[in-house]
Amino acid sequence: MPSVTETSSAAPAAQAVSKTNLSVRRYRKSVTGLTAAELAALRSALTRMIALSDDRGFGYWAGIHGLPLPISCTHGSPLFLPWHRAYLYYFEQHLLDQMPSGQPVSLPWWDWSAQAGIPAAYAAAKLPDGAENPLAGAPISGIPAAQFNDENVPQVDHTFRQPGPVGPDQGPAGLPSARQVAAVLALKDFDDFTVQLEDLHNQVHVWVGGTMSEIPVAAFDPVFWAHHTMIDRLWALWQLAHPGAGVGSVPLNHPLGPFPTLTVAHTLTTTALGYDYAAATSSATPA
């Protein structure tokens, strides 16, 4: 298994595991840019992950973000972006493990700044052949009943959504606009950038509604991963536009628990983790 080495002069050399050959970089695409075969492979891999009940499974990785306790996700701090990049990285490694042979598909992003609503690939409950669409929702499993309460989150056994209004000019009740994204990408200071990007992130969680609006169970919704891949992509675009900007006052050797081997230093570039973002026509581009 090859290692990933952070070579930036701003950080000490560090290593993290990767299941991929870094000489062949993976490219994350927009969900609307996936071919029919890629979408089928993604659904197949997700279905296989959902069926696993061990630490390779969807329920295990979804549960790291919130319930079951302890809640590990980091919000409202400069660690928000590094922690979620590490989280996506490990989830994607296990997703790739379940891909059909010869059909590796990286996590796609959902460009919600187009304000078109839930992507069609994630919205339809049924596929054309009548099978359940695993991208439309997933079981919520592995959480002891005692960890559900009215102040935390009501007990549910499956994800659901209650999306808000679609289209432009919906204000805070709608999805963030391309103009809002451009304004955030134009910020020069990392601390300002991460705070305002997290605000847009929060707006999307609230817009989707249902279990996506509840931190303890949000990651059980498959659209969570497309949303957070978009957030990671925007950070990557900001990093390209502001080389050397770093991550504010966060120590580069800060561990990103509960993930073994990854520190903040590993998250300074996507390519050090073996992936990049495919170029695409998008309403969310650097200013």
Image: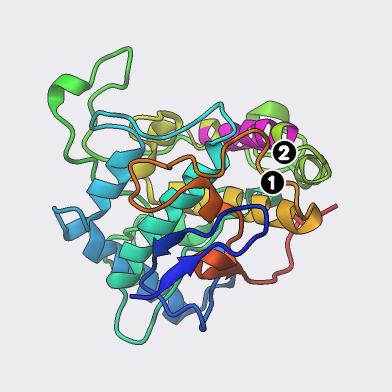
Q: Residue at x 54, y 36 (%)?
A: 79
In the image, is 81 to the left or to the right of 285? left
- Cα distance in 3D space between marks 1 and 2: 7 Å
Quickly name the residue at label 1.
Answer: 246
Q: Which residues are magenta?
A: 192-205
Mark 1 or mark 2: whose residue is earlier in sequence: 2
Q: Colour scheme in the image?
A: rainbow
Point out residue 186 in the picture as x, y percentages from the top left corner.
83, 44
Magenta stretch: helix, strand or loop mostly: helix
Q: Quadrant of the N terminus?
A: bottom left
In the image, is 225 to the left or to the right of 10? left
Label 2 crowd bin: few (<14), some (14–19), many (20+), radius 10 Å:
some
Quickly name the residue at label 2.
Answer: 190
> Can the viewer see residue 119?
yes
In the image, is 204 to the left or to the right of 225? right
Task: Tell me if label 1 and label 2 are in contact, CB under 8 Å.
Answer: yes
Point out residue 246 in the picture as x, y percentages from the top left corner.
69, 46
